[in-house]
Amino acid sequence: MASITRLLAGVLLFGVVACSHVDVSSPNIRGIAFVNTNKATKAHPLYSQLQDLDAAIAAIDLSAAVPMVPKSPEEMKADIASIKAQLAQAETQSSQAIGALQSRLAKEERTEVAAALRSAGLNAAAQAYESAPLISSAAQAQAIEKSAANNLQSYQKSVVEQGQATMGALEKRLHEQAQGRFETRAAQYAREESDLSLRLSQQDADQRLALQTKLNNLALDDAQRKAITAQLKAIDENEKAQVSAMRARHQRELQAYQNSLQAGIMKQIRAHASALQAQTQTQLQARQQQVSKQLAALSGPRLPSNLPAATKAQLEQIASNLQQRYQADLTKISDQFNQTRSDLEAQYEALNGVDVGAVGAAKQQRDKLAQERGDLYKKIQAQIATAARRIAKRDGFSVVLLDPIAHPGGYDLTGDVISSLKSTGT
Amino acid sequence: MKHRILAFVAILCAVGVFIAPSAIADDLTDVGTIAQSAIASLPAFVSANKQLGAIASQMQQQEAAQMKGAKNDAQRQQIQLEFSQRFNDKQNEILGPLLQRVQLALAAVSAKRKLSVVVDRHIVVYGGQDITTDVLNLVTGTQAIPPVTATPPPSPIGYVDQSVLDNGLPKVKAANDAFAKFAQQQRAIFAAKMQKATTSAEKQQISVEFNNVLRKEQDTLLKPLVSKVRAITATIAEKKHLLVVVDKGDIVFGGTDITQDVRNGLNH
């Protein structure tokens, strides 16, 4: 009898427990549950860490928002110089890193290729390959060739531009000099003409005065008056003719002088151009020879032409792998340089009053904190999701949604999730 | 007698537990999920977005150049509006056909699986039918996707376009603007305090205070409005026999749109 009572009590207890549990299939729930992640996040054991990170990030942001105290011109100059120096250093480091990378990969390629040749029984070729001057990979060689060609091209361009600029400046200077000389000569001629006119006028002054005095005599008849007037006119014309003759001569001389000046300019320009061309040619040839030598050094050791197909494939694989690594490392170096340059540019802009927010070390620190914050937040969210999934599966929900705007129905799992997080730590 | 009563209650509860789920209501099994990020990662979308990025950059430069010539705010606003419109047109031209194909694929897969709603995967932590692969296969296929004539069945999952509520309601907009202005003023005040701080502990304390001040103002200005929006949303959702309401951005297909009802409720 007692056992029947215990059995019934057990069944009743099971029934009561089951009845008191959430009925996931009730019309108001229909298998839907939801979690308020904001609430669950705030209740998470790691939330205080998240808050600390938020505060640290906000502190950097606020520091960046502080209006800058204007700097003195000396301070500005020093800061700009420092930024430029840092940029130059970054460029040098970047170039050195690329050089080191090329050298390292070239060594690795040599070792790997020699090993491949040896494994194919081509010991002599392997030895020749190893003992040849250090080469870079085909991709690197191509890249360097391309870079060298570009450098040569830009050098040619710069030399030609420099020559053109020199010639332009020379031409301008010669024209200015010629113009100055011409103007001096023209002024001298103008003075001579003026002097002649004055001299003639003084020379004829007595005669002109006498004739004019005669002309003032009222007793003169018309014929006499006409004759005196004609004499006066003749004197004027004579003077004018002499001055005109001189002017005409001067004009001819000036024209000839101008022609000779132009010819002189052209002669000088041609002489300079010829010298410059020779100089440019020498410079370009020297550079070309230098580049050719560099490229010749890159051609490195030759591989035997009759390699077995398997070895060829192996060598191609080595080249391909090294090329990939080269590209990947080159990208890293380039990214690093670009990042430094970007920081320095931001600092430069900040110096010039541009609002760029946190920069330099502060920016790096902020980025680091933001990354940590992001990782921690993801971890918390993942733990909330795991707990929600476990409870949903246990209780038989069909769907669990995150953060609905409103929920007249469905079951709020947030409390259960928080309890789970607190009890298990996950 | 006592045993009989106990037995009756126990059997009633036990039976209730076993038959209730099937007898009371059907669980929601017609909820589909999709990883929208997987669609956005399709080469066609990546390429279209790249193209749009280049256009946006070009337009920004043009806009900046035109802005320099603007004499007043009205002209600046006009320029901004024109460029925004031009960009939208370009976006529709480039992304429109792709999005249309995705919608056709979604409709086809949803009809096949008898789904009333498809939501973005990131708001679902458990359950739902993941249709990402099916949709991707259809979208990337070479064949034309025939349109589905039947509309999806009514869903107990509703949605609200919160951006419409945020931007379209004067009260919400005024509260947002007031908060932005307050935040700007406080930033200046706390930035000055920050300048005087020497230790990182002091700086941390100032930023905590700053966040508290902002939170308090947010509670004063925005929380009542948010609560009101939520309450009205809940009331309308209840009237429409919806179980939950999510943001429109999380709904990919189907669902019950109650944005206009909520808007009307707020305006009254």
Image (tube, helix red, strand yellow):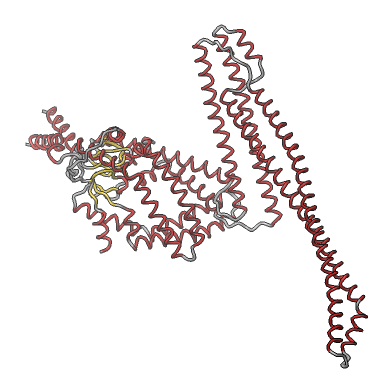
User: Whole-percent x and y of residue A120?
Assistant: 54, 8
Q: Residue at x 57, y 44 (%)?
A: A342
User: Whole-percent x and y of residue B59?
Assistant: 45, 51
User: Whole-percent x and y of residue A29?
Assistant: 21, 43
In which quadrant is the C terminus of chain A drawn? top left
Q: Is residue B212 left or right of residue A301?
A: left
Residue found at the far left of this picture = B1
Q: In this view of the protein, which residue sits in the foreground, B165 or B36?
A: B36
Q: Residue at x 62, y 32 (%)?
A: A149
Q: In this view of the protein, which residue sits in the foreground, A42 or B235?
A: B235
- Name the quadrant containing residue A126: top right
Q: Is residue A383 visible?
A: no
Residue found at the far bottom of this picture = A219
- Name the quadrant containing residue A241: bottom right
Q: Is residue B9 left or right of residue B258?
A: left
Q: Residue at x 32, y 41 (%)?
A: B98
Q: Is residue B42 visible?
A: yes
- Name the quadrant containing residue B179: bottom left
User: Whole-percent x and y of residue A234?
Assistant: 85, 76
In which quadrant is the N terminus of chain A drawn? top left
Q: Is residue B97 left or right of residue B82?
A: left
Image height of B73 relative to A320, above or below: below
